[in-house]
Image (cartoon, rainbow, N blue to C red):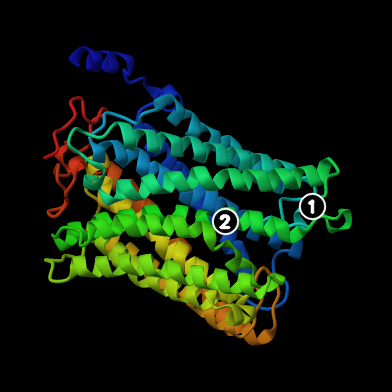
Amino acid sequence: MSTNIDHIKEEHHQPSGIMRWITTTNHKDIGSLYLWFSLLMFFIGGFMALIIRAELFQPGLQFVVPGFFNQMTTMHALIMIFGALMPAFVGLANWQLPMMIGAPDMALPRLNNWSFWILPFAFTMLISTLFFESGGPAAGWTLYPPLSLQGGNSMPFVIFSLHLLGASSILGAINVIATILNMRAPGMTLMKMPIFVWTWLITAFLLIAAMPVLAGAITMLLTDRFYGTSFFTAAGGGDPVLFQHIFWFFGHPEVYILILPAFGIVSTIIPAFSRKKLFGYDSMVYATASIALLSFIVWAHHMFTVGMPLAGEIFFMFTTMLIAVPTGVKVFNWIATMWRGSMTFETPMLFSLAFIVLFTIGGFSGLMLAITPADFQYHDTYFVVAHFHYVLVPGAIFAVIAAVYYWLPKWTGKMYNETLGKIHFWMTTIFVNITFFPMHFVGLAGMPRRIPDYAVQFTDFNMIASVGAFGFGLSQLLFVYILFLTLKQPVTAADKSWEGAEGLEWTLPSPAPYHSFDKPPKID
């Protein structure tokens, strides 16, 4: 065994300079690349959101023409989902999974390198479409025909970049599954794995099941546009609604791809700061698996208004509501973990608590949207925008920020400034609510989404939301400043940075060594 380890060490000597990052097969380096890339994309996607909110500050057309506004709404969503959130979670998986299961590295290191370096090329292609004469994609992130078939020249480039992003995700997922199933430390059975590892295992299967469906849908769009097929063209006997079915069969599991790893993060942080074991570990695993399975049979709740048969509407209404059960199990388990725990409120814990409260609000508005007759009023209004932003911003983004604060001392060997972290938390949480809560009201009053102009009665709430959005954007600059300060300071962090933290990663020195476990640890 030792000769094998020596060979690995020899093989993986650390190159320096730019080549270290381009050629690296080390899980920590690749994890860092993913995280820095997602931060860059977060700010690019965020800038687009601010253009949208600046336009909506008052009624009438202020800054941009409607065509460009539609390009911003489309690009903002594509960049945030595929460029900011998914790479952030894959970055966390790369960093943490080997350390959590006692592995020296990911199972497929070269594939790992490749799955990252596909991303910059794909996003360069996607963003470059904004500079085309006909402009970028303006069909919404859902790319519904006929809009996506009528646009300018950007669509084939958008579709190709989405294919690349899908390929990157599938490669990453294969790597995660291979690592978790084959490289666990001796004695670590599946039911002894940290919950974050479980959520990622299930997410990886979701990715492999869902991404090819998106690839199929956008390839059919491409053939409709350039090869004379009529999958989605009504004039040729096709059906645009078919695209919606195929897209949302991918799209709803995708929502859970973005949220299940967040559940894993929160299930790691809450026990650490409650100084208790996670309540109901087994039920958490089963709840995660249930959510993943149910996510494939609820897709048509996005389509209640297309004219489905009554039996179809009732089926999708009840299956959607059923997802609330395992999600509720999770929320109650988190509360039970905190119950009578010796709690402290450091920044990762604060973000996790805000996650629970605000994600639950997003969940309840999702239940409202699941009620078919009610959805006829809510559909395509700002109520929907409020719902999914409550799930994805205080849900997924808060979980990523909490994870960064929680594991940063382990990654860098340096402790962040707690006071600044708490200021960042309060600013972010207050501004998130100022931005998205008013959208519930304008949505219920009937304001349609994806429009650059609106009726005058919606002005006040839109002004509040726009002020909140700019405040939220500025708050994230503080986050970057905190990261910069942490990396620059000389103070080192303890090996076990948090008193209640448990798991194999805290047995390693801080910063974590380039190769995590030369000898696999024994698990009792």
Which of the 4 quarters of the picture holds residue 306? bottom right
| Badge 1: residue crowd in 10 Å (few <14, some 14–19, many ≥20) | some
The local secondary structure at tag 1 comes to helix
Which of the 4 quarters of the picture holds residue 159? top right
Q: Pick whichever, 346 or 209, lies toward us.
A: 209
- Residue at left 58%, top 82%? 374
Which image quadrant: the N terminus? Answer: top left
Picture disc at residue 374: none
Q: Which amino acid type corresponds to the residue marked 2 in the rendered image?
A: Gly
The local secondary structure at tag 2 comes to helix
User: Disc 1 marks which residue?
Assistant: 149
Q: Position of residue 401 (x, y in %)?
A: 35, 55
Extreme residue in the front direction: 311
| Badge 2: residue crowd in 10 Å (few <14, some 14–19, many ≥20) | many
In the rendered image, the vertical position of residue 11 relative to residue 212, given as above or below:
above
- Residue at left 29%, top 53%? 405
Task: Tell me if residue 28 can be seen.
Answer: no
User: Disc 2 marks which residue?
Assistant: 251
- Residue at left 46%, top 69%? 390
Which image quadrant: the C terminus? Answer: top left
- Residue at left 53%, top 53%? 81
